[in-house]
Amino acid sequence: MMAGAKAAEKEAQQKAEELEQTAKEVEKNTAEAIARKLLQNGVDIGFVADF
């Protein structure tokens, strides 16, 4: 019983880490897309983005 619980806990931790990484990628892609759109529209975004 304990081994199954430990395995499930480890799997849940891995899934959480994968979701966190995906969220970071989505956030980065969104920021890049917004910056690109602003620049296309001639808006001076006033900062240097680190992409």
Image: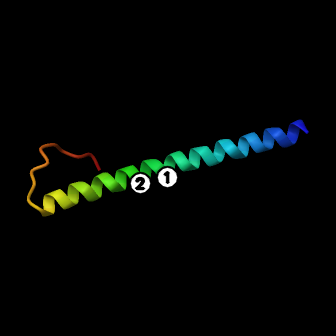
Q: Are marks 2 and 1 in contact (CB under 8 Å)?
A: yes
Report x, y in % for residue 30. Answer: 33, 55
Indicate whether 6 appears above or below 37: above
Residue at 43% across, 47% down: 24
In the rendered image of this protein, does residue 33 appear above or below residue 5?
below
User: At 9% across and 50% down in the image, what residue appears?
Assistant: 44
Q: Is residue 44 left or right of residue 23?
A: left
Residue furthest to the top in view is: 2
State the separation of the CA atoms marked 2 and 1.
Answer: 6 Å
Residue 7, image x, y percentages? 79, 43
- Residue at disc 2, secondary structure: helix
Res 22 label:
1
Q: Secondary structure at mark 1?
A: helix
The residue at which mark 2 appears reads as 26
- How does the figure colour the protein chain or chains? rainbow
Disc tally is 2
For residue 5, the mark is none
Disc 1 residue type (three-letter): Thr
Q: Is residue 3 above or below residue 26?
A: above
Going by the numbered disc 2, the residue's amino acid type is Val
Q: Residue furthest right?
A: 1
Q: Where in the figure is residue 4, as x and y percent of width and height?
A: 85, 43
Q: Mark 1: few, some, or many residues within 10 Å (few <14, many ≥20)?
A: few
Could you say which quadrant of the image residue 34 lies in? bottom left
Is residue 48 toward the left or the right of residue 1 in the image? Answer: left
Q: Residue at x 22, y 54 (%)?
A: 35
Binning the other alpha carbons within 10 Å of mark 2 as few (below 14), some (14 to 19) or many (20 upward) gives few
Q: Position of residue 3 (x, y in %)?
A: 87, 39
Quarter of the image with the N terminus in it: top right
State the residue at coordinates (66%, 41%).
13
